[in-house]
Image (cartoon, grey):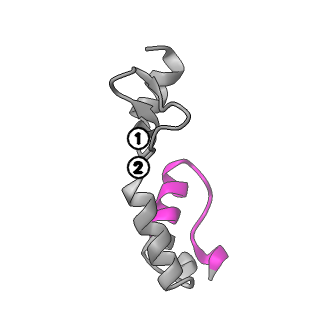
């Protein structure tokens, strides 16, 4: 596996983009299942305000801060 694919495979949430059997990216036409993304989209559709104040907002702020962004979440309030 190439270095870029190894990096993708190790990134949270990105491993789903790889086809373990083929050892590379999911091929065009093959199903790409992302159940966590689907659950997030359903939750936001049910309560769009949660994008700014709910669990999604909290996870987004945590991810941004973990990546070094000077973000508190107050920017969305």
Seen at 56% across and 85% down, the residue is: 49
Seen at 50% across and 16% down, the residue is: 3
Q: Earlier in the sequence, mark 2 or mark 1?
A: 1
x, y percent for residue 22: 39, 21
Seen at 64% across and 77% down, the residue is: 76
x, y percent for residue 68: 57, 49
Residue for badge 1 = 16
Residues 46 and 64: in front is 46
Residue for badge 2 = 33
x, y percent for residue 23: 40, 20
Horizontally, residue 71 falls left or right of residue 6, namely right
Image height check: is 59 above or below 28? below
Classed neighbour count for the residue bearing mark 2: other residues with Cα under 10 Å, few (<14), some (14–19), many (≥20)? few
Image height check: is 39 above or below 47? above
Residues 35 and 73: in front is 35
Q: Are marks 2 and 1 in contact (CB under 8 Å)?
A: yes
Image height check: is 58 above or below 15? below
Name the chief secondary structure element in magenta: helix
* Residue range of the region highlighted in magenta in the rendering: 58-76
> Can residue 48 be found in the magenta stretch?
no
Classed neighbour count for the residue bearing mark 1: other residues with Cα under 10 Å, few (<14), some (14–19), many (≥20)? some
């Amino acid at each position: 596996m190439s270095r870029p694919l190894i990096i993708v495979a190790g990134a949270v949430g990105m491993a789903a983009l790889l086809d373990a059997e083929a050892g590379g990216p999911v091929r065009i036409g093959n199903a790409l299942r992302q159940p966590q993304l689907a659950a997030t989209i359903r939750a936001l559709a049910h309560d769009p305000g949660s994008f700014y104040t709910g669990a999604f907002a909290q996870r987004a702020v945590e991810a941004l801060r973990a990546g070094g962004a000077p973000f508190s979440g107050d920017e969305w309030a």
